[in-house]
Amino acid sequence: MPMIAWVVGDWRYMILATTLPCTVAFLLQGMMPESPRWLASRGKVKRAMASLQYIADVNGKQLPEDTLPVLEAIASRKEKTFGIPSLFSNARLAKNTFMIITCW
């Protein structure tokens, strides 16, 4: 950020230069496709399949024949959910969490 402030010169323009990209990403997040893996893990197999098909079409590729069974297998598995206490479950995770919080 100091380099942006040095290049831009005025603090008002620096705020614009650092805020506008985030604002554009926030406003356009509805246009970004969701992760097929995340969709499948949430049980939304049809949406995951549609998303993978779109990706394959854009890349000019064909989906493998076993795509649907793999997505259904992912959907049938239960994922563990972890909370904030899990960030301090062992010494290494606690150290990394503390370092990230401090850097923020």
Image (tube, rainbow, N blue to C red):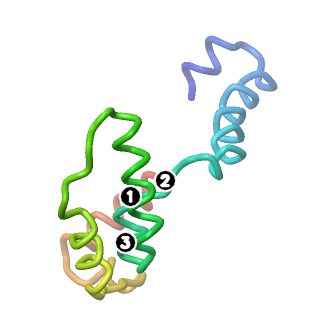
Mark 3 or 1: the one toward you: 3
On screen, residue 88 above or below 62:
below
The three-letter amino acid code for the residue at tag 2 is Trp
Mark 2, residues whose alpha carbon is within 10 Å: few (<14), some, or many (≥20)?
few
Residue 77 in picture, x, y percent from top left: 26, 85
The three-letter amino acid code for the residue at tag 3 is Ala
On screen, residue 58 above or below 103:
above
The three-letter amino acid code for the residue at tag 1 is Ile
Q: Which mark is residue 65?
A: none
Which element type, helix, strand or loop, lies under badge 2? Answer: loop
Mark 3 or 2: the one toward you: 3
In this figure, which residue is indicated by the disc labeled 1? 100
Residue 30 in picture, x, y percent from top left: 65, 52
Which element type, helix, strand or loop, lies under badge 3? Answer: helix
In this figure, which residue is indicated by the disc labeled 2? 104
Q: Which mark is residue 40?
A: 3
Q: Residue at x 18, y 64 (%)?
A: 66
Q: Is residue 35 left or right of residue 69?
A: right
Q: Residue at x 60, y 20 (%)?
A: 4
Mark 3 and mark 2: Cα distance apart in space:
32 Å
Specify which label sits upstream in the sequence, 3 or 1: 3
Quarter of the picture holding the N terminus: top right
